[in-house]
Amino acid sequence: MNFLAALSLRSKIQRNLVLFLCLPFSASAGTIAGFVTDLESGEPLAWANITIVGTLHGTATNSNGYYALPGVEPGLQTLRLSYVGYAPITRKVVVRPSQRIRVDVALEVRPIEIEGAVASADRQEQERAVQTGFVSLESRSFRELPAMVETDILRGLQLLPGVQSASDFSSGLYIRGGGPDQTLILLDQIPLYNPSHAFGFFSTFNADAIRDMSLHKGAYPANYGGRLGAVLDVANRDGNRKRFAGRGGMSLIATRATLEGPTASGSWMFSGRRTHLDPVLAAMRASGMDVPDYYFYDVNLKVNQDLGSADKLSVSGYFGNDRLDFDLTASTSFLLEWGNRAVTTKWTHIFSPQVFGNFLLAWSRYQSVTSFSLFETPLLFRSVISDLSIKADFDFYLSRNHTLNLGAITSRFDFDYLQSFNTEDQLDVAIRPIEFATYAQDEWRIDSLTSARFGFRASYFSEGQRFHLDPRLSLSRALTDATRVKASAGSYHQHLQLIATEGFNGGDVWIPLDETVRPGESIQIAVGTDWSPSKSWELSAEGYYTDLRDLVAVDTRVASDSADEDNTAEKIFITDGEGYATGLEIFAQKRAGALTGWIGYGLGWTRRTFAEVNQGKSYPPKYDRRHDFSLVATLRRGKWVFGLTQVYATGQAFTPASARYSMRAPALGTMLPDDLLLPADKNSARLFPYHRMDLSIKRMLRFLGADWEVYLQAFNAYNRRNEWFVQYDTSESEVDPEVVRMLPILPTIGVNFSF
């Protein structure tokens, strides 16, 4: 083929491709598009359902509340819009050939006490849901659950099957056999690297400031990446577009307040929370008690501005910090401080009713500082990770059967590690990698019963010059009007590794893997089914398998050595690990009526294998749980709300001691004062099973023009002293394992308000 013939063929291919892509936009059928919002506040409703009555044509809103229905037949059509917890409505629309119609709809909240409030909205959502392991929730879903002092969305998520906690002291998420570092946590689409306060006791998410959240427990789609396991995507409230409003409350630990209101063509929201223990701790120190000075705070804010009917600009921010200051003696002091900062600027643009764009400029920073001073000689360690990201996402509503999602993101990371002694730097390392990723996925409605989502994510990480191409696939098939089966699979890579302090969060350090260590890889497969036996009940079962390769673990021998700027990732980590996680999850939920709640059960196995750990033998990680059961119930009676949660889980794995021996100090020629212990196989023993019950009673009041809620809660109501870990005291003649236990019963009182 000569050059002119090749050029002619290329021109024909390009022309035909353009005609193919433009065909859905130029057909005689019309297009209906718009936004779905909350009637009272104007907040966008993500994942609301829109159908054309009498047809199989339907869709769901995206994360911005936008929808588009291309390929609508000309004539009088009836739209039906529904959303969980809202009253469904219908709209009559006259569609002319090739016409593009903007239909914005506001839905009204329907009290959950009304039997059938979820009606067919849930069932339509489940019938159309393609992704396995996907949970979409509003923050109000957790406000009525019994809580540990403060409402906490991460602790609420721990009540779902497949999501576990490490202890009473941790709000970290262990999802389907993966650690917290294997879950990507986003706030307004920007990562948070340590979403915890009080050493993990509370999460950084103030429920009053949160609009909604989406949890992908595994096999997540191509628009996410960078973690081996799961994704939690949290969105701040936009702010009330209709009126000035507020909410807040006070617990035994903290006080919080949220204010929001409209602007000329937009809205704003400000939310703050801070502990109020300072006067109590100061009084305790004044009386001679050795207690530290501690506080935490967080601030969420957001401003939105409409720039016309097709454009919207928003700026959001999060600022949180923890500080622990402890004077151990007159000459010795200890300071630990950590916190997150995040700022996001987002622009959304409707290029046409069938093309929606979302553009993001975001900055995030996590810093941890540990300072120890002895006789005015300071020792300082500081770890900082920040990233600056530019992101673009496009939704192309090509036809009634195809929706194409395209996107790309570029991130520049700054990793800074500083260690100094007596003001002289012993370690000062800065790493500046760049990551680029792009994705494409098609949501394809194959026929009236079958849907698919297939795509890929391509990523490049400059540290180590790593390139990966990860395919993703999901399939869904309706068996009946109320039953659907689903399957998902995908490949995932992770270039960042977390070094966490055992037992609490606060001194976390993130390290990028360089050319000496291959990044972790996972292959995930999940198969499940959903069944809606009635308008109020949803039942689901899902099995999963995750194959893990190129895992890394911190080499404690290197971690305990002196600082060395020449340490590569290969020297810091034990590499080439393998593992798997597999299990079954069963979930039954009642979502309407005076009594609501769910029952969840998880059955799981998790294993890890490293050549240099446990003599090369496979072992379970400490968070491996064979059985995990949860019961959640909420009963509403007039102005009273009663809550109950009951959890049961297999005890955590731990490494017992198998023998005791003495050792002589070579330099002194004398025996060491304490004996040493020879460990048995890693994590070969189990603590006793974990179980507890939480209770709450709430009373609704109307006072001073505001709605008030007074509550009494009891965490661990029957005072079960669950086991946390086992330690040994080798200074005694008889060495018996000593069990360190978790929290006793913890009653709390508080008040919430809204206006």
Image (cartoon, rainbow, N blue to C red):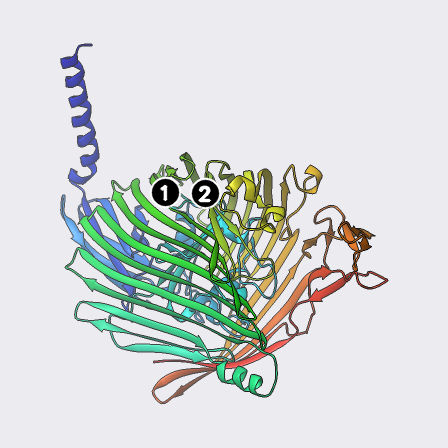
Q: Which residue is mark 2?
A: 495
Q: Could you tell me which quadrant the N terminus lies in?
A: top left
- Look at the numbered disc 2 and give the secondary structure of its residue: loop
Work out whether residue 14 or residue 373 is closer to the camera in this orientation and state it. Answer: 373
Q: Residues within 10 Å of mark 2 (few under 14, many from 20)?
A: many
Q: Quadrant of residue 130?
A: top left
Q: Quadrant of residue 365?
A: bottom left
Q: Position of residue 709 (x, y in %)?
A: 45, 81
The outermost residue toward the front is 668
Q: Which mark is residue 718?
A: none
- Mark closer to the chain start, 2 or 1: 1
Q: Position of residue 64 (x, y in %)?
A: 29, 56
The answer to whether residue 172 is above or below residue 433 is below
Q: Residue at x 78, y 59 (%)?
A: 674
Q: CA distance from mark 2 to mark 1?
A: 9 Å
Q: Position of residue 226 (x, y in %)?
A: 43, 45
Q: How many marks?
A: 2
Tell whether 701 sits left or right of 440. Answer: right
Q: Which residue is mark 1?
A: 435
- Look at the numbered disc 1 and give the secondary structure of its residue: strand
Find out whether the residues at labels 2 and 1 contact each other: C-beta distance under 8 Å.
yes
**Residue flagged by tag 2: what amino acid is it?**
His
Q: Residue at x 60, y 59 (%)?
A: 166
Q: Quadrant of residue 548?
A: top right
